[in-house]
Image (cartoon, rainbow, N blue to C red):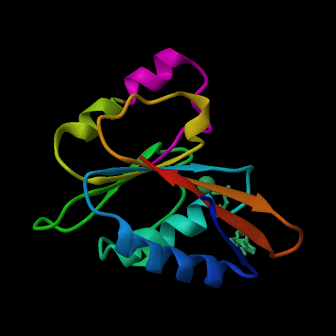
Amino acid sequence: MTEEIITHSSEETIGWGREFAKRLQPPVLVLLTGDLGTGKTTLTKGLVSGLGAATENDVTSPTFTLVHVYGKQAQAKVYHADLYRIESFHDFETLGLEDVFATPAVAILEWSEKFPLPSPWPLVRIRLEHLGADSRRISVLGTS
Ligand SMILES: Nc1ncnc2c1ncn2[C@@H]1O[C@H](COP(=O)(O)OP(=O)(O)O)[C@@H](O)[C@H]1O
Ligand SMILES: [Mg+2]
C-alpha cells in the first residue's frame, strides 16, 4: 500500500524526513524520484539529520559534486548522490557507486530513475510531486 503525505513547506518536508529516518536501518538504498525542485534534497536534509549523520545545514545538493558522504566514524555512513548531471552509462560507472555497497550504510539517491543501480540492499522508493506553490506530495512507493 502506498503511504502518502502532503507537506506545505520545506520545514514540514524536513520534519517528515527526520521522522522517516527512524525507519531506515543500514544497509538500505533510498531512491528519490521527482522533478527538479520537488524537494529531494530538502527531504534528504531531514533524513540525514534524523539519522544523526550531519545537521540539515550541512546537507547540500550533490548536483555538481555527485556524491556526498556524511556520518561520524563510529556510525554507519550516509551517502547522498544525484544522477541529474550524469549523461552516459560510462559517467554513471565512473561514479563508483558499487563501492558504496562495501559496508552497510544508508545510501540516498536523487534522480535514481536515470540509471538503474543494481543493489544488493533493501530499497525504499520515495516519489515527490509538486502540487503547486509550497505543497508537495510525498509517496512512499514501497520497500523491498
Ligand atoms: N513542501 C515543500 N517541501 C520541500 N521543498 C519545498 C516545499 N515548499 C517549498 N519548497 C522549496 O522547493 C525547493 C526544493 O528544492 P530541492 O529540495 O533542491 O529540490 P530537488 O532536490 O528535488 O531538485 C526548495 O527551494 C524548497 O525551499
Ligand atoms: Mg536535488
Q: Quadrant of residue 112?
A: top right
**In this image, 66 relative to 110: left or right?**
left
- Residue 122 place in picture, x, y as percent: 35, 46
- Residue 24 place in picture, x, y as percent: 35, 64
Q: Residue furthest front?
A: 1
Ligand 2 in which quarter: bottom right
Q: Quadrant of residue 3?
A: bottom right
Query: 63 or 82: nearer the eye?
Result: 82
Relative to 90, is 86 above or below? Answer: below
**In this image, 132 relative to 65: left or right?**
right
- Residue 22 place in picture, x, y as percent: 36, 75
Query: 35 or 87: nearer the eye?
Result: 35
Q: Residue furthest left?
A: 74
Relative to 137, is 57 above or below? Answer: below
Relative to 74, is 37 above or below? Answer: above
Q: Residue furthest top?
A: 90
Q: Residue furthest right?
A: 132
Q: Residue at x 39, y 76 (%)?
A: 49
Q: Residue at x 12, y 65 (%)?
A: 73
Q: Residue at x 51, y 63 (%)?
A: 60
The magenta segment: 81-95
Image quadrant in which the N terminus is located:
bottom right
**In this image, 123 relative to 72: left or right?**
right
Residue 94 drawn in magenta? yes
Count of numbered labels shown in the rendering: 0
- Residue 93 place in picture, x, y as percent: 41, 21
